Amino acid sequence: MKPLFQRGRKFALIGMAAGILGLGSIAAQAQTKVVVGYQQIVGPFVSAIADGSFDKAAQEAGYKIDWRQFSSAGDISTAFASRDVPIGVLGSTGITAAVTRGVNIELFWILDNIGKSEALVARNGSGVSKPEDLVGKKVGVPFVSTAHFHLLVGMDKVWKIDPRKVNILNMQPPQIVAAWQRGDLDAAYVWPPALTEIQKTGTTIADSEQIGKASVPTFDGIVADRDWAAKNPKFMAAFTKVLAQSYKDYNANAGKLAADSAGVKGISKMIGGKPDDIVSALQLLLFPDAKEQASNAWLGGGKDGGAVKALTESAKFLKEQRQIDKPLDDYSPFVNASYAEAAAK
């Protein structure tokens, strides 16, 4: 039997441990839960989700992230409108449509300059060898997405095709792949990993880099509920800091990108797709760093900034396509460069 002093010390240590566990439990309960929505896109953002960088930074700021994957811009726009999601991923067209319809969100980070990573692919054997051949054919595309926007822009301004003469079907990326494999589609306009998959048995006949040069470029962005962001500056600062670091690291090592790298494996784990296909998809995109984000080329510059100009032009076309009633007079209140500016310092 141990001396009473040692027994007492043991009980005291047990009590201290219980107290520490209790404090840990209280701290965990004190964390603010925040839902962050993402989509099936590739880039440093998704790899930073996979390696836990965002979760660690959020926890240190007193938050716990609930990651939720959405299959389309329409679904995530609905979640924003219902205030179910305060942070999430939307393409430039989805952002334009949402804010025009009264959803109170702000763009605070450019995920990527889309370029060649969204493309129009004709299925082998479909009889489609050029965009003009789409008349009377079935084309799959996720509605209210940047791909949908550029498909319509291409038809209207580049190829001079009446969209009403094309059977355009609203399909999410996994649905496009399944329909493609069944032979139910003649063509599709989509992004990786679905794009990479359909290109294996199809031919790319146009892409968003080409259409963007003839009209307006498209991009993917991260948006926040404006009210929520204003009330949670610690989270916004921590979240954007992780974005800035992940983009800096990616751009510094882009030349060494390989299928077996941790970042590529992380993206594959989060959204599916083979590592080799992920590498190919990444090489089609541009990822502006924090300094570029805050510049007039993207988030800065007010009405003269690149992002605001893109939203403004997107709104004009959405009006022409009767997807919105009337464009806003000014889209600059929905673009916020302050978080990127702080992260760039």
Image: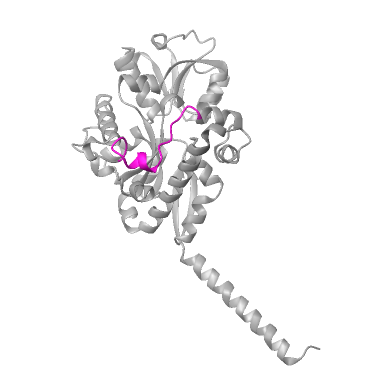
Q: Is residue 27 visible?
A: yes
134 left or right of 260 in image = left
Tell me: residue 83, above or below residue 324: below
Residue at image coords 54%, 9%: 125
Q: How many marks?
A: 0
Figure colour scheme: one colour
User: How far across and down, in percent of the image, does residue 311 sit?
Assistant: 28, 33
Q: Picture quarter containing residue 181?
A: top right
322 left or right of 39? left
Residue drawn where x is 46% and y is 9% of the image: 128
Q: Is residue 274 visible?
A: no
Q: What residue occupies the far left of the structure in this picture? A: 329
Residue found farthest to the bottom: 4
| Image location of residue 45, percent across then percent down | 47, 42
Seen from this angle, which residue lies furthest right? 1
Q: Is residue 24 above or below residue 195?
A: below
- Residue 25 sits inside the magenta stretch: no
Q: Quadrant for residue 327, please give it.
A: top left
Tell me the magenta residue range.
Answer: 283-299
* Residue 256: image location, x then y, percent: 57, 33
Q: Quadrant of the N terminus?
A: bottom right
Along the line of sight, the residue nearer the viewer: 196 or 53 = 53
User: In terms of secondary structure, what is the magenta stretch mainly?
Assistant: loop
Measuring from the top left, give residue 223's x and y in whole percent: 36, 44
* Above/below status of 206 relative to 91: above
Q: Nearer the viewer, residue 345 or 224?
A: 345
At 51% from the left and 65% from the top, the residue drawn is 28
Residue 289 included in the magenta stretch of the image: yes
Frontmost residue, 237 versus 184? 237
Answer above or below: position of 130 versus 90: above
